């Protein structure tokens, strides 16, 4: 779901799958993900309106949870600490 908000004189479009979206909105984070996200353009070349596509890093066995790295930057939100519980042996310990 795309919404738009006004910030100053520029329109900013925010992608928010909190209430509407497809299966991809249920993919969880992992510090050792098996899929990655890529912006793709097929119905417009307007950089403000990409479609978000997920691709596998490798062959994924049926029944395996699909996870991707949210790529949040630890320390980017002042006063916010979000621990990571992905369970990976390579877990960074924090999302934020
Ligand atoms: Zn983790």
Image (cartoon, rainbow, N blue to C red):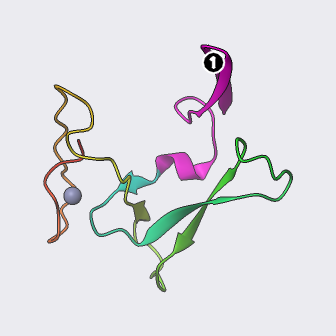
Q: Is residue 8 magenta?
A: yes
Residue 40 sits above or below residue 34 on the image? above
> Image point 36% across, 68% down: which residue?
33
Residue 75 sits above or below residue 4 on the image? below
> Image point 67% across, 31% down: which residue?
2
> Image point 20% across, 39% down: which residue?
75
Q: Percent x, y for residue 89?
A: 14, 71
- Left or right, residue 10 beside residue 89: right
Q: Percent x, y for residue 88?
A: 19, 67
- Residue located farthest toward the front when viewing the structure as drawn: 9
- Badge 1 marks a residue whose secondary structure is strand
- Left or right, residue 74 beside residue 33: left
- Left or right, residue 44 beside residue 4: right
Q: Percent x, y for residue 30?
A: 30, 60
- Residue located farthest toward the right when viewing the structure as drawn: 43
Point out the image quarter for the N terminus: top right
- Left or right, residue 11 beside residue 46: left
Disc 1: which residue: 5
Point out the image quarter for the C terminus: top left
Residue 26 sits above or below residue 62 on the image? above
Q: Quadrant of ligand 1?
A: bottom left
Nearest to the observer: residue 71 or residue 53: 71
> Image point 47% across, 79% down: which residue?
57
CB at disc 1 and ligand 1 closer than 8 Å: no
The image quarter containing residue 64 is: bottom left
User: How packed is label 1: few (under 14 Cα within 10 Å), some, or many (20 or more)?
Assistant: few
Stretch in magenta: 1-26
């Amino acid at each position: 779901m795309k919404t738009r908000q006004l910030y100053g004189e520029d329109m900013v479009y925010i992608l928010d799958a909190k209430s509407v979206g497809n299966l991809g909105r249920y993919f969880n984070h992992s510090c050792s993900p098996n899929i990655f996200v890529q912006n793709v353009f097929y119905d417009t070349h307007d950089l403000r309106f990409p479609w978000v596509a997920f691709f596998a890093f490798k062959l994924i066995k049926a029944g395996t949870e699909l996870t991707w790295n949210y790529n949040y930057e630890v320390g980017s939100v002042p006063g916010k600490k979000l621990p990571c519980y992905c369970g990976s042996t390579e877990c960074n310990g924090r999302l934020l």
